[in-house]
Amino acid sequence: MPVLEIDDGGFRLDGEPFRLLSGGLHYFRVHPAQWADRLRKARLMGLNTVDTYVPWNLHQPRPGEFRMDGALDLPAFLDLAAAEGLHVLLRPGPYICAEWEGGGLPSWLLAEPDMRLRSRDPRFLAAVDDYFARLLTPLRPYLATRGGPVLAVQVENEYGAYGDDTAYLAHLADSLRGCGVDVPLFTCDQPADLARGALPGVLATANFGSRSAQNLAALRAHQPQGPLLSAEFWIGWFDRWGGHHVVRDPDQAGRELDELLATGASVNFYMFHGGTNFGFTNGANDKHTYRPTVTSYDYDAPLDEAGDPTEKFTAFREVIAKYAPVPTEPAPAPSPKLALPAVPLTESAALLDCAAALGAAVESERPLTMEQLGQDFGFVLYETVLTAPGPVLLEIDQVRDRAQVFLDGQPVGVLERESHEHALAFGVPRAGSVLSLLVENQGRVNYGPGIHDRKGLPGTVLLDGAPLTGWTSRPLPLTSPAGLPFATTVTAPTGPAFHRGAFPLAAAADTFLHLDGWTKGAAWINGFALGRYWSRGPQRSLYVPAPVLRAGTNKIVVLELHAAHRARTVDFRATPDLGPTGE
């Protein structure tokens, strides 16, 4: 593969002028069996490059562990990109934002009570240096200087929106170079943050979604010479629970792209294909109010969540064709979809009853946070025994992020961080009643100072004004629903419960799981974690990739936290429901 060079006039590839026509495609948001399909479609739209973040928290779930296999087989993804004739922009972080859990920073960093993330805290820098060494050493053959597809590597991510410590950025750049990264480095920032987030001697790029001429002028004012690159050209947006599904008119987005390319600048679409926040991997924002991101990362992108071309695919392809050769092959057709109505879930297992099978309880005077428990995702079940009957007031300083409160297994209320709820009054029937709090991590904050987002019950818990002590904290990561004591039941158990069913298929195909009549929870098919659902919307279906299914019998498990569908059935449909597009 040719090597990218940067000079005062712009990019050069193999000595010839070069324009990056790139699009975001996160391998960790796409089933690996579908990587090749998505990469082929990137080429067919006219792209010559794809861009991907690297999620540190998945690759290094614990300090001494590192994974780069299965759904995290980044070398395999890079091989497929190269086979498709695509270059790659690699964005390893350490922080990636991406509406991803914690911005990609591993939760174990927060086990240190005074850890300062994205700073020169020696503990943070040591962890980053170790991560870079583990990640980049096996990736050296994939650098363009060694014949691989990776043209350039990003330093941090929109750092100017967070801080202004140039020495911190310089350390990261030195660490990347020390790991053998000898391709060009770049930073990316919104135009107003360029002065804070840029690093002298490293290419600065700008992130924006409109007013291209104005924003590129700001980049040129900051960086008088060299290439102009919009490293994130926002052509859609993400959704949050309780909001609406954000869309952008494809013709208007095409006009914005035309304006950008007419300047001679390079572009990286954010996103070309968004994919899915499978499992519990979605992030959240907290600008005075906590707002978790939904499971779908469709992003109103040129390829939708199922990898099908949208109107934007056609609009962008037509614009790109004005400035660069576009493949003559026709636009790809949508993938086959299957429909299967009213699948019954006849077996159930009450979560509180089988909690011991899901995690071991840890005794302590005060509730332990997820990070203290060594837990990344899922829930924690906190329990304590109340010593006297009568009316009480429970006050919780910090709910991170949603606490369902039970007394002797019966629900008495819910406290939500998003609603700024901290207190609940109820009656205790007897001495010795067990108070249980099932606390859900709804996604660690991925942007701004709120990234120091410890989960569970990190503050004080008071009962009638006095500290409540003598707790057990039971981690429930729910990495798999296997091994639960399911039993056939006529009616659903009271409170949170798992529900299981089976359905036959003659052949696998993409589909969408619809949970009309269900309230809130998560779903798995054949052990694969599809993600969260919530009746508040906007998202009302979950994407099921074809590789998750198989010919023959398939099993589905739904964790319902509140009220299951009266008939305990779910539907598989050929179309998604991402919610209304206006408020």
Image: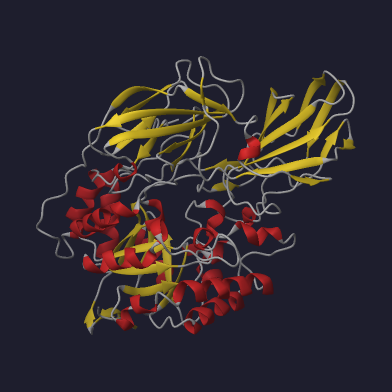
Q: Is residue 488 above or below residue 9?
A: above
Residue shown at 50% from the left, 84% from the top: 178
Residue shown at 88% from the left, 21% from the top: 389
Q: Quadrant of residue 245?
A: top left
Left or right, 285 with reference to 204 = right
From the top left corner, tell me how far across and down residue 91 is, in percent. Answer: 43, 67
Left or right, 460 with reference to 518 = right
From the top left corner, tell me how far across and down residue 214 is, in percent. Answer: 39, 61
One can see residue 151 in this view: yes
From the top left corner, tell me how far across and down residue 441 is, in percent. Answer: 61, 43
From the top left corner, tell me how far across and down residue 473 is, in percent. Answer: 73, 43
- Depth check: 493 or 297 in front? 493
One can see residue 121 in this view: no
Q: Is residue 44 above or below residue 336?
A: below
Left or right, 481 with reference to 513 = right
Q: Is residue 217 above or below residue 419?
A: below
- Depth check: 82 or 362 in front? 362
- Depth check: 72 or 325 in front? 72
Quarter occupied by the N terminus = bottom left
Q: Is residue 211 above or below residue 325?
A: above
Q: Quadrant of residue 379?
A: top right
Residue shown at 64% from the left, 53% from the top: 450
Residue shown at 36% from the left, 51% from the top: 30
